[in-house]
Amino acid sequence: MEFTPEFVAGTAALVLTLVFAYFPVLRVKFAGLASEMKSLIMLGLFALVSLGAFALAFYGIIPTAEPLTWFKLVQVFMLTVVLSQPAYTILPKPADVRDAKLIRDYAILEESFGEEK
């Protein structure tokens, strides 16, 4: 098996997805955040993972047959995003995550109705 930048970044993205979905304390706090904030956090982490995999390839720690260009970096980043989405979607949500999302949604509804008074 060859450890290419795509493989390293894709694997790291899946591990991050699993950590945010199942690590006990983190999953509840993460589920309670607004969707926009969760997206920004994950995109930032995927960018770091992509840069890390790109750096490993740049310094020759992991092999790559293609030349390293900015396009390759963007390609690795897009791969991390694309791989994580179906994984997050199909993972079963623990009960405490469902509860945290309900609490978040209730607070949002309460705020929106409170402003109309």
Image (cartoon, grey):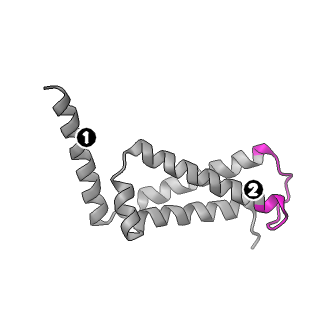
Label 1 packing within 10 angstroms: few (<14), some (14-19), many (20+): few
User: Is any part of residue 11 visible from this angle?
Assistant: yes
Q: Is residue 44 above or below residue 15?
A: above
Q: In this view, does 48 lie to the left or right of 35?
A: right
Q: Which amino acid does label 2 sit on?
A: Phe
Determine if the magenta segment contains residue 64: yes
Dividing the picture into quadrants, the one containing residue 83 is bottom right
> Which residue does the image show at 54% across and 66% down from the upper left?
15
Residue 65 has which mark? none
Percent of width and height locating residue 17:
50, 61
Q: What is the crowding at mark 2: few (fewer than 14 residues within 10 Å), some, or many (at least 20)?
A: many
Magenta span includes 106 = no
The residue singled out by tag 1 in the image is 108
Determine the residue positioned at 43% across, 45% down.
Answer: 37
The mark that comes first in sequence, 2 or 1, is 2
* Residue at image point 70% right, 48% down: 75
- Judging by the rendered image, the residue that carries numbered circle 2 is 54
- When the figure is inspected, residue 111 is found, relative to residue 24, above or below; the finding is above
What residue span does the magenta drawing correspond to?
56-71
